[in-house]
Amino acid sequence: QVQLVETGGGVVQPGGSLRLSCAGSGFTFSRYGIHWVRQAAGKGLEWLSFIRYDGNDVYAVSVRGRFSVSRDNSENTVSLQMNNLRAEDTAVYYCGKDDAYHMDVWGKGTTVTVSS
Amino acid sequence: QTVVTQEPSFSVSPGGTVTLTCGLNSDSVSTNYHPSWYQQTPGQAPRTLIYNTNVRSSGVPDRFSGSILGDKAALTITGARADDESDYYCALYMGGDIWLFGTGTKVTVL
């Protein structure tokens, strides 16, 4: 079945970096864009980034310049590199498969905690 | 700053009908924004309900329907059940490969 699995979450100090991965299976990964969405505890969903099937990427203002996304279609993975992390980046991070202008499949999420 | 607004909360009786809305502070929501709707229960990943305004995602019961009502996107739950008690988020495509989520609505069934 179509599946996305996020990995790479953990605890990192303010100013540090972390790299998340999103592995896809059950579909032709190279044909689809992938979103990154996060949710801080008790808060709503926040769209962060989108990488198209061809590798073009776009970011929300809140993370532009600190986060970057890339993809390796040979490994069916998308990575989110997060630099200069702040306490307010603490959240559950989800990846979602794009289809017809929406996220049709979601991973279960990975938790990032930014704390000293 | 563009904000996508939703009602903070709604209460509905079992078997009742509730309509949630999704608006923009800077424009009227139309089908051009490709509104989509997601359901989320605590501790779980979002589940896709509706996309492109009114298309139900695979496996979503027809109790859930999407539309444009006036200048907002809308999600209607007809015949509410206890397991519909969740948070609901809309998302709008803003163009240029950018999306925005709404503020979310907490639906209570009682």
Image (spheres, coloured by chain):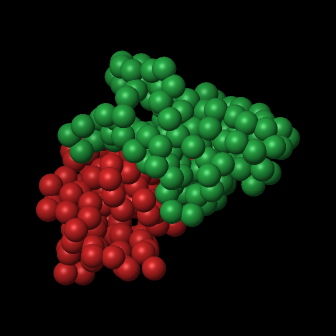
Chain colours: A red, B green
Tell me which residue sits at (39%, 44%) in the image.
B52
Name the spot of residue B9 as percent of width and height, x first: 68, 32
Q: Can residue A75 be seen from the camera position used here?
A: yes
Q: Nearer the viewer, residue B85 or B42?
A: B85
Tell me which residue sits at (19%, 63%) in the image.
A53
**Residue A54 horizontal side relative to residue B19, left or right:** left
**Residue B64 horizontal side relative to residue A95, left or right:** right
Q: Looking at the picture, does residue A55 appear above or below residue B18?
A: below
Tell me which residue sits at (54%, 33%) in the image.
B74
Q: Looking at the picture, does residue A10 appear above or below residue A85?
A: below
Q: Looking at the picture, does residue B61 appear above or below residue A108?
A: above
**Residue A66 horizontal side relative to residue B26, left or right:** left
Q: Looking at the picture, does residue A57 appear above or below residue A106?
A: above
Image quarter for residue B2? Answer: top left
Name the spot of residue A5 as percent of width and height, x first: 43, 73
Tell me which residue sits at (45%, 21%) in the image.
B71
Q: How many discs appear?
A: 0
Which corner quadrant holds the N terminus of chain A?
bottom left
Name the spot of residue A64 as percent of width and height, x first: 24, 43
Q: Can residue A110 be seen from the camera position used here?
A: no
